Image (tube, helix red, strand yellow):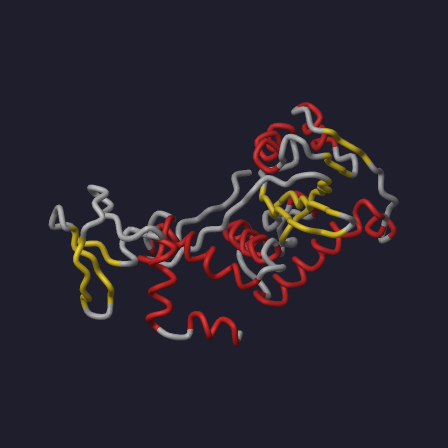
Amino acid sequence: MSEFIVHYGREDQYEAAFIQARWSNGFCCPRYQVRMASQFRRGDLLTWRCGHCPHQTSLISVTMMEYSRLPFTKKPLQGDVRIDDAYLGGELTGGRAGRGSDNKVPFVVALEVRNGKPMRVRFDPVKNFSFAALKPWASIALAPDCTVTSDGLLGFEVVEQLGFAHRVVIAPKGKAGTEIEPFRWLNVVLGNLKTALSGTHHAYNFRKYADRYLAESQYRFNRRFNLAAMVPRLAVALMYATPCSGKKLMVRTEIER
């Protein structure tokens, strides 16, 4: 926190950080790509007027900062990758029980392990765990040279069909199955995720918001070794992401059944 205050404690430092994130080589008019511009303030907002045209651009115009939605970057996992099927949510009163519950959201948890330690994770909601649903997930989530370890779920055989090296380890039933070496860290990460979500949010519409909460947890986990880098990386993401209106922010993003 003290380091954060030193770098971003004043308004001018905040502005400088976002200018560097958006125009690291100096202002550039988004219409004509011209670098000549005059600078002024409209109220408290720093604004540029293009020297070639009358177009004006504020520091946050045509960026995610116009509204409030935050993007989360996902990258393919590499090397030793452990995967498992998981669910968020529980049975609704009077609803279907088990995996068919209307309040359960299926997602794949995939963990990149290096030197026996968890490094990066992906939490990806999916429609179900069929070949059809998992094939596009594997194509995006896994780097070509990775080796995947799963517990033998039928749908995960799709990784072999796509050419990935695949190791199947059948885990014992019950708690013992969560503690064996291939899946111990995977289950620790998954357990911490669910504890954090339930402890922080208590309850929410799983089918509507699960993808956003999972993305937030993934973003923080993958940057835990360099917390200071989260601020400039978030600034870059905010400056380059397209705007999202309040109406669009509230649109339902339920996973299709």
Image quarter (top left, top right, bottom left or bottom right) of the C terminus: top right
Whether 243 is drawn above or below 163: the answer is below
x and y percent of residue 52 in the render?
13, 46
Point 61% across, 61% down: residue: 197
Q: Quadrant of residue 76?
A: top right
> Which is more toward the observer, 20 or 245?
20
> Which is more toward the observer, 154 or 48?
48
Q: Quadrant of residue 58?
A: bottom left
> Which is more toward the observer, 87 or 223?
223
Left or right position of 84 against 10: right
Left or right position of 166 against 48: right
x and y percent of residue 81 in the render?
71, 41
Q: Quadrant of residue 139?
A: top right
Left or right position of 39 against 169: left
Q: How many marks?
A: 0
x and y percent of residue 138 in the render?
62, 33
x and y percent of residue 42 in the render?
18, 66
Point 88% across, 44% down: residue: 172
